[in-house]
Image (cartoon, rainbow, N blue to C red):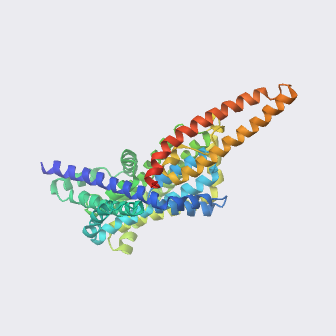
Amino acid sequence: MAIFNSLLALLAGIGVFIVGMNMLSHSLQKVAGPGMKRMIGKITKNRFLGVGIGAAVTGIIQSSAATTVMAIGFVNIGTMTLFQATSVIMGANIGTTVTGLLVSLSSFDIGLYASALAFVGAMMQFVKKDRVKNIGGIICGLGLIFIGLDLMSGSFNNDEIKQAIQNIFSNISFPLLLLLLGILFTALMQSSSAMTGLVIVMVVKEVMPLESGLFIILGANIGTCVTALIATIGTNVNAKRTGFIHLLFNLIGVSLFTIIVWIFSSQIVNVLNTIFGNNYAIEIAVFHVVFNVSTTLLLLPFIKYLVRIAEFVIRDKGDERARVIKFIDERLLSTPSIAMTQVKKEILNMAILAQDNFKRSIEEIYTQKGDYLKTIDETEEDIDYLNSAITKFLIKLSPLLNKTFPID
């Protein structure tokens, strides 16, 4: 019975942690929406600026998956090139390490005080002002993260379950198997942050060796690509390439680091223990930072080659419908302020098509040659399709705008 209760506590802790992360992320997006729009609007062909913006946006909204999906959406509607999206994705991988550093604070015995933030944030939800509510969501989400960590940690206080998991990881010590565990569990939870938090708790409670934790963290970086790959379903060819580049980037980095950690595992563990005094939470968080920063620095000069590989693997089959819609994409609904800007551009795009078609119609009336008849019919179909697409998009966007920017 005690083991069953411990397992329930572990699952509850993971659930509370994920809810806290989602609340923190969504509230931060609402507060920082206009700022993110300005930052993304400054993306140029400068790869360093792209990495910086990707890291900053991810650090702000606490979700590399959200940043990557946003980049896929921009590529899909043609407002961001594949080159630009690649640098943003690299930055997003750096920005996501902020979560690990945040989780590592639990090692400083501030869990009880941080958990109290959940109450403070919940009380702020009763204030009428939306900005106060959003800030309360940030505070409450932060508190829930530490409550989740505390629940996960408490689940390992039972000696039986602790011994059982220790036995499991004493038998599962092969690096590739540990990588696979990290990939599978992260893909199932759809959150590398939750996986990082769980690994930190298990290593701190000494139910898993630090070395095993490092391999699982590496696997989590591949598992988190599942969200981006799902987001490419139904997109154009360049958006699919963006998702593939995200996967390729992590595969290359994980492969290199797996070899290094595999060969020099004892030396790496000794260095981390010496520098951070056996503070396992900080050691795992720092390792995650080093992995993502090093992989980015290594692959940053080769963005063009990553793009070429993606173009070779995912061939252009000529998506005619993708050419009609240039600015709107449902993946942008997660950031209503950006979505509103894009829908205005799409309406202008439709107006330009209508204006051009009107000019062709007048010309056809005067000349009676029939030169523009086919073009007029095709453009009219495009306009009708755009009109329908914009209407459907606005129907989905409207309630989100009312929540974010309420109309008195």
Residue 319 shows up from this direction: no
- Apparent side of residue 212 relative to residue 53 in the rendered image (left or right): left
Residue at figure coordinates x 42%, y 51% from the top left: 219
Residue 327 in the image, given as x and y percentages of width and height = 61, 45
Closest to the observer, 160 or 171: 160
Closest to the observer, 35 or 370: 370
Quarter the C terminus occupies: bottom left
Residue 34 in the image, given as x and y percentages of width and height = 53, 60
Q: Is residue 13 above or below residue 108?
A: above
So how many labels did they put on this image? 0
- Image quadrant where residue 365 sits: top right
Residue 347 in the image, given as x and y percentages of width and height = 63, 44
Q: Is residue 86 above or below residue 239?
A: below
Closest to the observer, 84 or 170: 84
Residue 158 shows up from this direction: yes
- Apparent side of residue 353 relative to residue 333 in the rendered image (left or right): right
Closest to the observer, 389 or 304: 389
Q: Is residue 153 above or below residue 12?
A: below
Residue 402 in the image, given as x and y percentages of width and height = 45, 50
Which residue occupies the extreme left position in the image? 1
